[in-house]
Amino acid sequence: MTNKVSRNDPCPCGSGKKYKLCCMQKVQNDDVKQKIATGIIESYKQMTTGFEKELEERTVDEVAYDNIIIEELRKGSSIKKALKIAAEKYPDEALQYDDDTIGDIESHYDYLLKHEAIKNRIKIG
């Protein structure tokens, strides 16, 4: 059985102050932070469910092609150089681009990099 600390009780930290004047606010703040973090994770999972399903439907070569591009971008290569390197290895998967579409392609791969970092940060599968 857990004894709940009332706001006017002595603080369990041993400071001699009343709980309401000592650690109560910190406990409440920690609870709020936990609820916010849980909400963010759940929202993230909901938003990415469709994206994850789409990724699961891809061929092995499509995944390998994207992985080469992402690895090259991590090394600091430009998007055009990364696309060229990936296309040399997987010509059937090569994206066709021009000056009008390269920005969209770059945004796509930037999203993939950020998506991966977010997943790792919040420890989602």
Image (tube, rainbow, N blue to C red):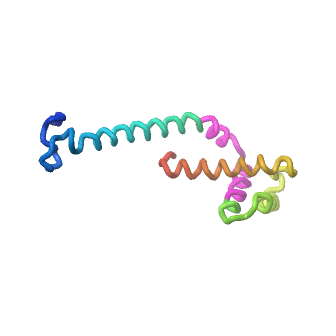
Is residue 34 shown left or right of residue 124?
left
Query: How many numbered dots are placed on residues in this image?
Result: 0
> What's drawn in magenta, residue-wise?
49-70
Residue 56 quadrant: top right
Kindly tell me whether residue 4 is visible in this rendering: no
Q: Could you say which is closer to the camera, residue 9 or residue 35?
A: 9
Q: Let me know if residue 58 is in the magenta part.
A: yes
User: Which residue extends farthest right?
Assistant: 98
Kindly tell me whether residue 95 is visible in this rendering: yes
Q: Residue at x 39, y 41 (%)?
A: 33
Q: Position of residue 84 (x, y in %)?
A: 81, 60
Q: Position of residue 87 (x, y in %)?
A: 81, 58
Q: Let me know if residue 14 is in the magenta part.
A: no
Magenta stretch, overall SS: helix
Q: Could you say which is closer to the camera, residue 58 or residue 7?
A: 7
Location of the N terminus by quadrant is top left
Residue 64 quadrant: bottom right
Q: Could you say which is closer to the camera, residue 1 or residue 66?
A: 1
Q: Residue at x 40, y 36 (%)?
A: 35
Is residue 96 shown left or right of residue 7?
right
Q: Position of residue 17 (x, y in %)?
A: 15, 45
Is residue 36 shown left or right of residue 31?
right
Q: Is residue 52 above or below residue 96?
A: above
Q: Residue at x 50, y 51 (%)?
A: 121
